[in-house]
Amino acid sequence: MRLLAVLLLCPLLALAEPATVIRATELKKEPASDAATLAELPENAALEALERRGGWTRVKSASGEGWVRMLALRFGGPGAAKAGDSGVAQLFSAARTGSSGTQVTTGVRGLDEAMLANAQPNKAELEKMSQFAATPEAAAGFAAQGQLAAHPVDEVK
Amino acid sequence: MRRLLAALTLIAALPAAQAQFRLPNLDVNRMIESAKNVGKATREIGEPEEIAIGRDLAATLLGAAPLVNDPAMQRYVNNVGRWLAAQTERPGLPWRFGVLDAPQINAFAVPGGTVFITRGLLEKMKSEAELAGVLGHEITHVVKKHHLKAIQKGAMTALAGEALQMAVQNRNAAANEKLVSFGKEMYARGLDKDDEFEADRGGVVIAARAGYDAYGLPAVLQTLQAMNPQDSGLALMFKTHPAPAARLDALGAKMQPTLDAWSSQPALAERFRAQLKR
């Protein structure tokens, strides 16, 4: 039981993702470009990504722990894609057996291509969605609660 | 050559168009003229028509997957989305946001101000700034009328200009059905890659304007990059969008100054987790 509590308190371990350096970059002591440089990480260096703060990712590398520019990383390990599946197809192919069974090709419940093609308008659900709409005033109050301040930012073409 | 082809297509389509829409005083020259000029016709679909088309398409997407039965979650996503939409050039649209009860990872924009995100994608996110980046991407599709223009371009070939105008303005059942069926195809086929890259840049800008950590959208793209590309839950999204690596490269190339200028704004990870009860 105590072990379980300890495990639940270690979310960072669960979040560790294999990542690869896609262009040579500096391992920094803090998430800032003027922070001390701990090491130079070469292209293709493999590491573990732990957490993100703004444009910086905390990583565990062969040269120790530190922060690197988030966009200098590619997730998913060196070259190869991560194995495994979210299980969506397996989960729902089971639910499908026993039905008429004519659409067994790519059938997954929800928003896949086949479901989209066969979808019939659901007006009741559209009505329901309107009930949840936010007024501009309510949304502004919600933003203020989160300390979100609006300001101009130029569009980039 | 192109003009000839357009003319031939139209002539071939005429009997069908006539039968279905009973065009009065059919003027072949005018139809060719309007089919030639998609850009001009784009300006002719007014906002009320855009909203009406959007309602039909939104109802259709809801026919593929209903809303998640969680009013608090739906209201939360509407608050985030409405606040973002207020920072755009089209704040007055009837903005609606919905979380679809589907395990696949995807999001959809519908003309006229409706935006959907799937439960599958929401569950992959770690903060409100990430949600803001994704909703900002979809809001950009609406603001820039990407889908509306695609519908118009595609429907133009299928229906011919005058018939499209009738479909939009008169909303007769047969024409409506054609529009919806074209819409389904469009969501299965996806938009132009350039529209997607533009929506990525727009998503970053809108999130930054609204006061969020601007790195939310790149963070979601990295999460998708870490997943197995063969994952069945990603199939439709990967078919209809450029690969996450290409999208991240494009953002890095053009958006680095914007991203860095607004990277220390709130990400609101705790509020996000509290809302999703995890």
Image (cartoon, coloured by chain):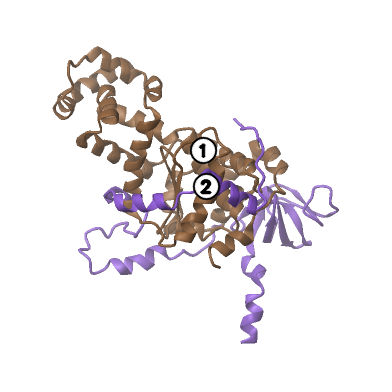
Chain of the residue that carries numbered disc 1 in the rendered image: B
**Do the residues under discs 1 and 2 have CB atoms within 8 angstroms?**
no
Residue occupying image coordinates x 45% and y 58%:
B119
Name above or below for residue B251 compared with residue A15.
above
Q: Residue furthest right?
A: A36
For residue B81, which numbered disc appears in the image? 2
Residue occupying image coordinates x 30% and y 53%:
A124
Q: Residue furthest bottom?
A: A1
Q: Secondary structure under badge 2?
A: helix
Q: CA distance from mark 1 to mark 2?
A: 12 Å
Q: Residue furthest front?
A: A137
For the N terminus of chain B, the image quarter is: top left
Residue occupying image coordinates x 72% and y 41%:
B261
The one of B235 and B93 positioned closer to us in this rendering: B93
Q: Position of residue A91 (x, y in %)?
A: 38, 68
Left or right: B151 in relation to A78: left
Residue occupying image coordinates x 39% and y 57%:
B67
Q: Amino acid at mark 2?
A: Gly
For the C terminus of chain B, the image quarter is: bottom right
Q: Position of residue A17 (x, y in %)?
A: 62, 62
- Snapshot quadrant of residue A65: bottom right
Q: Position of residue A133 (x, y in %)?
A: 45, 49
Left or right: A111 in relation to A155: left
Name above or below for residue B2 compared with residue B258.
above
Of callouts 1 and 2, the N-terminal one: 2
